[in-house]
Amino acid sequence: MKRVATIILNRNLPNETDQLWKQVDDNNHETTDIYVVEAGSDSNNLSTHTTWHVNDPESLRQGLRYSRGMNFALSELWKDNKFKNYEAFFLITNDTEFQTPHPIQDLLDVLDKHPKVGIVSPCSDQWGENILLQEQRVKYFWFVHNTAYMMRRNFLESIVNTQSPDMYRFIFDGTNFRGYGMESEMIAKAYANDWAVAITSDVQIRENESYLLNRSDFIKTEPYDENLKLYVEEGKKWMRDKYGFNSHWSMNSYAKLFYDQFFEYNPDLIGWRL
């Protein structure tokens, strides 16, 4: 049985998604099964490797975005009794570009060497965090802004919503449509449940922003600047409604609280702290 389920999120960019699928399969075939979620794609813009096509009227109109798309795929694996077959899940969008040849095995190596890590993220040479990961190539962080995560199944089982496994509530909060603050909420859930969140510079990726900058009409989303504005405005409203926080810093501080407590309970891991 393969150790990892890789989930790729696509909307109306079939060629790019197929290229990413091939790259993952060519270099990690022995390690992962690959699933593709069509997040409200038009029927004529589906990847040749499509697993699920979410095509209800609302999804066709506005897409799923990261939270709902990944919730959908993971909940389908749960309903099909396949969820428990995997040790971890690698969640990526179709604008992910790998700069290392065997990212999945390298991320698995981090999970194998760090049994308390529930989430591990690749790094990027464009991130400031890369500077902190020169000598010690794995560190436990309290903030990770990314759309490529490997998540340990045992961690996810501690937070899944088993009563309503669907696109709106399973792992992520699907009411936070564009995902501003999503990563801080997930990190807080990890540390609150005695799991760490790591970044490793052994796996390097980039997000190809040209898709949003130049092809927003194909993706059927707002132009980049408008999308960014809505991302922040809607996310801040979600944070205020759910947590009473009025800034992203408050959300980060919430995650940092559990981060600090984690090392109080696990002093043997202090060497991995920032």
Image: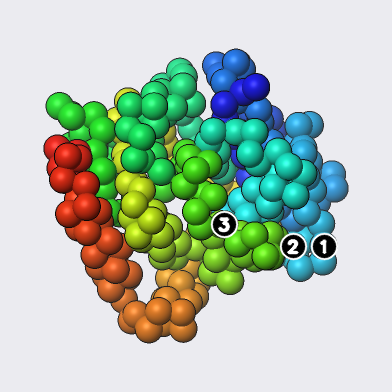
| Foreground pick, 121 / 268 | 268
112 left or right, relative to 60: left
| Foreground pick, 251 / 160 | 160
Asked whether disc 2 touches disc 1, contact meaning CB atoms under 8 Å apart, the reply is: yes
The amino acid marked with disc number 2 is: Ser
40 left or right, relative to 234: right
Mark sitting earlier along the chain (3/2) = 2
The amino acid marked with disc number 3 is: Val
The residue carrying pointer 3 sits among few (fewer than 14), some (14 to 19) or many (20 or more) residues within 10 Å by Cα, namely some
Mark 1, residue position: 56
The amino acid marked with disc number 1 is: Asp
51 left or right, relative to 137: right
Mark sitting earlier along the chain (1/3) = 1
Asked whether disc 3 touches disc 2, contact meaning CB atoms under 8 Å apart, the reply is: no
Residue 244 x/y as whole percent: 37, 83
Dividing the picture into quarters, in which one does residue 216 lie? bottom right
User: SS at mark 3?
Assistant: loop
- Name the mark on residue 160: 3
| Foreground pick, 140 / 215 | 140
Q: Is residue 75 visible?
A: yes
- What is the distance, in whole Å, between disc 3 and disc 2 at their CAs? 23 Å
Residue 130 x/y as whole percent: 24, 37
User: SS at mark 1?
Assistant: loop
265 left or right, relative to 49: left
- Name the mark on residue 265: none
Residue at 78% across, 54% down: 54
- Name the mark on residue 59: 2
User: Extreme right residue here?
Assistant: 43
Residue at 23% across, 29% down: 137
Residue at 33% across, 81% down: 246
Residue 76 x/y as whole percent: 73, 48
